[in-house]
Image (tube, rainbow, N blue to C red):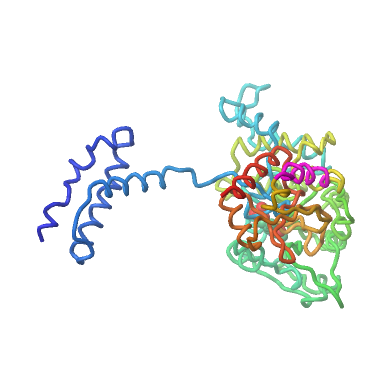
Amino acid sequence: MVLLKSIPKVDKFISNKEFETMAHSLVASISKRILQELRESILNNEINEIDEKILIEKVKNEYEEITRPSLQKVINATGVIVHTNLGRSLINEKAFLKAKDIATSYNNLEYDLKKGKRGERYSHISKVICETLGCEDVLIVNNNASAVFLILNTFAKNKEVVVSRGELVEIGGSFRVPDVMSSSGAILKEIGTTNKTHLKDYENAISENTSMLMKVHKSNYSIEGFTSEVSFQDIIEVANKNDLINYYDMGSGHLIDLPYGLDQGEPSVLKYMQDKPSLLSFSGDKLLGSVQAGIIVGKKKYIDQLKKNQLLRMLRVDKITLALLEENVTSILLGNLDEIPTLKMLFKTIDELKNNASILENSLNNLCQKEVCKTRICETQTVIGGGTTPNKKIPTVALALKIKNYKPNKIEKLLRAKNIIGRIENDEFLLDFRTIQEDEIKLIENIIKEICDE
Ligand SMILES: *Cc1c(COP(=O)(O)O)cnc(C)c1O
């Protein structure tokens, strides 16, 4: 094994001039690994010569791979507004700059500027949320999943929580209501059947060990046909009569009236608050259009109890989240819906979308004349997504794009390689303008031109 003796010594190898400007310890750990692999390949008779240049190249490539940012910007041309895989809701520039200011300087996160002593983390947001929603108090946690967990753990440990069988949902990321319930210590009391649950099912299920009547939003499915479900309003009434807590895990809570008749059967948080529920929770980054967070609203006496649970310390949110949420909810309170990208996209008219689509179409005119690509503006449908309004479509405008004689899935792949995510519908590749931002159109144009030139 002459070859084994020629394996470069680590110390000498990493002192190579090629690595001069790179982080020394990272080069060392990668090099050790690569030289070890080389040793194994030699022992397995897989190679018969050692080329130091190739080894150096290997180290450099791996170094690049590790240090290159993995989390990257993409263009969402799928038309799905609250796209869970693509980061759900966008944060607008104004809110981001405010949060940047808070995050890059000291701030009054837990300091009362008036009294000059310790203050409360959650106080900053409570005024604006309570004013917007008409609730007594509010608590913000890491996400809505943790809101559900905290509420069940605080009020229903070893006690029964009554839930309709038709609402025992599994949402993405393996969040299953029955499992969350058992991990929180609560005992699930299922009532009704898959398609029908009546008010008297709730009434009959109440026993000495009941702590809560809970409703869960059917976020990603709908039950149709011979069905009946009990409204949260009615559940509140039964709970109050029996001195029990009522709680609605609303999933995606919206504060404004939704367009395209999406409101049907999906009242806003404001409407629910008129019936003074004990507790209601929803996500910060679904239809609210802000940052990842779980927003718990309701009666002060229950929020106070939640604040005493040790778990809250593990679920608490950072100053950046609070800064973004405060800014976004203030925009909604002031009616500046344009400042919430999720809502701005939802409310775009067909004419605005057509206009944007034709900007891109016109810029590709030259290529179309040379017959390297072909475009067609089409009116079609999309969904909001993110478990917001299941099975409900909204109108949209897309640019169907054909490049050379490529198949739609090849075009999809080529654009995805440049971080543009589109969709295929009826054997056509579509760029959906419901979710394309105005300042992205030029970039898309350039990338399509690049692909056509290849
Ligand atoms: C989305 C959703 C959750 C989880 O919310 P996250 O903010 O993603 O943690 C919980 N319950 C329902 C009904 C949901 O739709």
Q: Taking the image as drawn, is residue 451 in sight?
A: yes
- Residue at 64%, 66% in the rendered image: 176
**Picture coordinates of residue 72 (x, y %)?**
55, 45
- Res. 150 visible in picture: no
91 or 403, which is in the foreground?
403
Dividing the picture into quadrants, the one containing residue 149 is bottom right
**144 or 93, which is in the foreground?**
93
Residue drawn at x 71%, y 69% as measured from the top left: 168
Q: Quadrant of residue 152 in the image?
A: bottom right
Magenta-span inclusion, residue 129: no
Across and down, in percent, residue 429 comes to 70, 59
**Residue plotted at (83% across, 60% down):** 232
Q: Which of 149 and 204 is in front in this view?
A: 149
* 361 inside magenta stretch: yes
Please identify the quadrant where the N terminus is shown: bottom left
- Toward which corner of the image does residue 267 lie, by quadrant? bottom right
Give the total of numbered labels: 0
What residue is rendered at 87% in x and 45% in y? 351
Type of secondary structure dominating the magenta stretch: helix
| Ligand 1 sits in quadrant | bottom right
For the record, the magenta segment spans 353-366
- In the image, farthest residue toward the front: 370
Where residue 236 appears, x then y in whole percent? 84, 59
Relative image position of residue 285 (x, y in whole percent): 69, 47
Q: Nearer the viewer, residue 25 or 204?
A: 25
